[in-house]
Image (cartoon, helix red, strand yellow):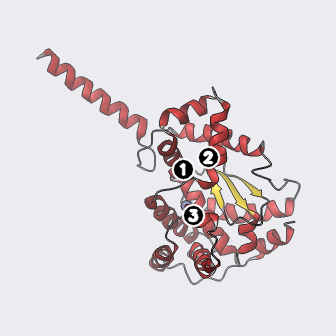
Amino acid sequence: MKKTVFQLAFGLAMAFSLSLASCDKNGNLNLLSVDEDKQLGVQVSAEIAANPTQYPLLPESNTVAYTNLRAIIDRVLNSGKLTYRDEFAWQVKIIQDDNTLNAFCTPGGYIYVYTGLIKYLDTEAQLAGVLGHEIAHADRRHTSRSMTQQYGYNFVVQAILGKDSSLITQMALNLKSLQNSRAHETEADAYSVTYLSATQYPCNGAAGFFEKLIASGQSGSTPAFLSTHPNPDNRVSAINTAADKQGCINRTASSDNFTKLRNALP
Ligand SMILES: [Zn+2]
């Protein structure tokens, strides 16, 4: 009898502590806390800043490029649709690499955009759509969940605690090629549409990028974005369907910030 009561109490305590530890404001399970996401972001972004060979960052002194990129990102961030708008850092850095079509975001909201992607795109809405997708990976906390899946919870926590600096180095190096699950990709696409629906941009901007990738896919080499973001064909129609439902496709938005950004790149 005593044992049964003990087991019941123990079971309840476990269930309670698990629900405390793992349910976030998005309603999703996550082994890491929101604070751990933020700490990961601080540490990984510091590691990226310290590794100019792998991540040659465009200097902040290029204020024209950063001001105009910031203007585009802020419209997405201020859409009122984010969960962690005020908690996460939402910093942005441009990586000088014209040969890489990619963008990524750390847990805690440190966004990285390659010059290759900016130069490849045609419109501001396409860039806003891709940024919306990457912002969703951080705000929906996909990236921290993918990291704990790839490395294991203990590895990530050891990295955050900083007992072995090589762990963060390793995570920072692999971040650009971190695989997200198909479910996370689908959700990030859907949130890109939702974020953009509350901006001036046609909300299917991300689809324009995928259509361009598909059209140029004949060349043989796989762009970085495609190797980590599978299934472009299905995604175009899913994005367009969601955008159509939300009635935010047929908009003409200025590409003024985008043009200034692109012209300011070396
Ligand atoms: Zn993605």
Work out which quarter of the rendered image holds the N terminus and state it: top left
Q: Position of residue 95 (x, y in %)?
A: 76, 57
Residue 257 percent coordinates (x, y): 77, 71
What residue is drawn where x is 33% and y is 32%? 16
Secondary structure under the numbered disc 2 in the rendered image:
loop
Q: Which residue is mark 2?
A: 88
The residue singled out by tag 3 in the image is: 227
Instruction: Classify mark 1: helix, strand or loop.
Output: helix
**Residue under the image location 17 percent in, 20 percent down:** 5
Give how far apart the Cα atoms at labels 1 and 3 are.
16 Å
Which badge, 3 or 2, comes first in the chain's sequence? 2
User: Which kind of residue does numbered mark 1 sit on?
Assistant: Thr
Residue 171 appears left or right of 191: right
State the residue position of label 1: 143
Quarter location, residue 129: bottom right
Question: Within the displayed image, which quadrant is ligand 1 positioned in?
Answer: bottom right
Q: Which residue of the protein is positioned furthest toward the top in this rendering?
A: 2
Q: Provide residue 28's location: percent of width, then percent of height.
A: 41, 48
Residue found at the far left of this picture:
1
Q: In the rendered image of this protein, does residue 215 appear above or below residue 100?
A: below
Q: Amino acid at mark 2?
A: Phe
